Image: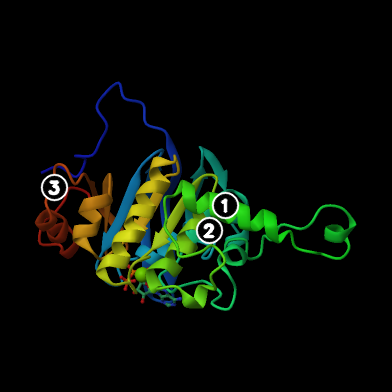
């Protein structure tokens, strides 16, 4: 079994959207990331798996500006970037969804979708009085949900009246609407039931099919095998291997994760 099973065939050109080289991040004596390489290709869902403490969240945080690495390089569309905070990454088109349901329950769906990026009325009403253009936000929210084929009771529902899956759907849709380069999700279905998870997985697929690559951290192997184009396996702060679900089994992936299967360079 080769760790390079997911390598493209010669002649196929693969565009790398986001790349990290030799990322190191320590917390005191704990080396969370020990020289990690990473690449996300155009048009793919890349799953990131690994045991607790393997460094998945820390890696993702360095890619979204939430953590500044001690050393290493990050390239977006081949250009070196130095994110100093999450807003830097957002401005460059990277959106992130976290496992805790990051929505405002007391607001309706359009207000949640445009939270922090509200559309203002035209003219002096917007520029001076900061009046919100509720109609444009409602239309935008409805169009986004329709494009992603995500069914909701009514676009005017308050988010507190939605199920957990529907709420997370709103958070995922928000990321999809504002991301221009890629979407990163850290355990987006961890708090959800089986049916609700299914809805969110469909949404992730819709985002990929719409042309945005997705990085998906998950502990759920069946979900990973169902969705991912490639699987990046983290172990002890390193990337142990990148495999394809077409050539590797769940047992292979778990074996590499736990160290039971040794991989060249891993
Ligand atoms: N802010 C922090 N301060 C100190 N140590 C940290 C911090 N963040 C992460 N670590 C440590 O770095 C290592 C990697 O943690 P990380 O959260 O990236 O793992 P993970 O793969 O996301 O795990 P999980 O599956 O449990 O979410 C762990 O040993 C963790 O304790
Ligand atoms: Mg984590």
Categorize mark 2 by other alpha carbons within 10 Å: few (<14), some (14-19), many (20+): many
Task: Tell me the CA gap for discs 3 and 2.
Answer: 33 Å
Q: Which mark is residue 227?
A: none
Categorize mark 1 by other alpha carbons within 10 Å: few (<14), some (14-19), many (20+): some
Q: Secondary structure at mark 2?
A: helix
Colouring of the image: rainbow
Where is residue 246? Give x, y as percent. 16, 42
Residue plotted at (36% across, 60% down): 200
The answer to which image quadrant residue 218 occupies is bottom left
Q: Nearer the viewer, residue 70 or 50?
A: 50
Residue carrying label 1 = 178
Tags 1 and 3 touching, CB below 8 Å: no
Q: Which mark is residue 174?
A: 2
Task: Tell which quarter ligand 1 is in.
Answer: bottom left
Q: Which mark is residue 248?
A: 3
Residue plotted at (82% across, 52% down): 122
Categorize mark 3 by other alpha carbons within 10 Å: few (<14), some (14-19), many (20+): some
Question: Looking at the picture, does residue 146 appear above or below residue 84?
Answer: above
Q: Can see residue 36?
A: no
């Amino acid at each position: 079994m080769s760790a390079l099973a997911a390598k493209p065939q010669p002649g196929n050109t693969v565009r790398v959207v986001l790349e990290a080289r030799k990322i190191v991040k320590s917390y005191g004596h704990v080396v969370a990331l020990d020289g990690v390489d990473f690449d996300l290709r155009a048009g793919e869902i890349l799953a990131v798996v690994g045991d607790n403490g393997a460094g998945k969240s820390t890696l993702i945080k360095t890619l979204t500006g939430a953590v500044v690495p001690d050393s290493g390089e990050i390239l977006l569309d081949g250009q070196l970037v130095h994110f100093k905070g999450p807003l830097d990454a957002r401005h460059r088109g990277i959106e992130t969804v976290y496992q805790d349901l990051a929505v405002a329950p007391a607001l309706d769906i359009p207000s949640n979708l445009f939270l922090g990026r509200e559309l203002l009325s035209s003219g002096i009403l917007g520029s001076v009085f900061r009046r919100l253009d509720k109609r444009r936000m409602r239309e935008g929210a409805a169009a986004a949900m329709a494009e992603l084929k995500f069914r909701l009771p009514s676009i005017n529902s308050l988010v507190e009246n939605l199920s957990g899956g529907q709420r997370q759907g709103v958070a995922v849709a928000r990321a999809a609407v504002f991301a221009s380069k890629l979407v990163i999700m850290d355990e987006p279905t961890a708090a959800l039931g089986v049916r609700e998870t299914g809805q969110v997985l469909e949404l992730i697929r819709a985002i990929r099919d719409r042309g945005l690559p997705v990085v998906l951290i998950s502990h759920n192997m069946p979900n990973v095998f169902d969705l991912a184009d490639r699987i990046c396996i983290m172990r002890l702060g390193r990337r142990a291997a990148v495999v394809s679900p077409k050539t590797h089994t769940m047992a292979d992936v778990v074996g590499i994760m736990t160290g039971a299967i040794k991989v060249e360079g891993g």
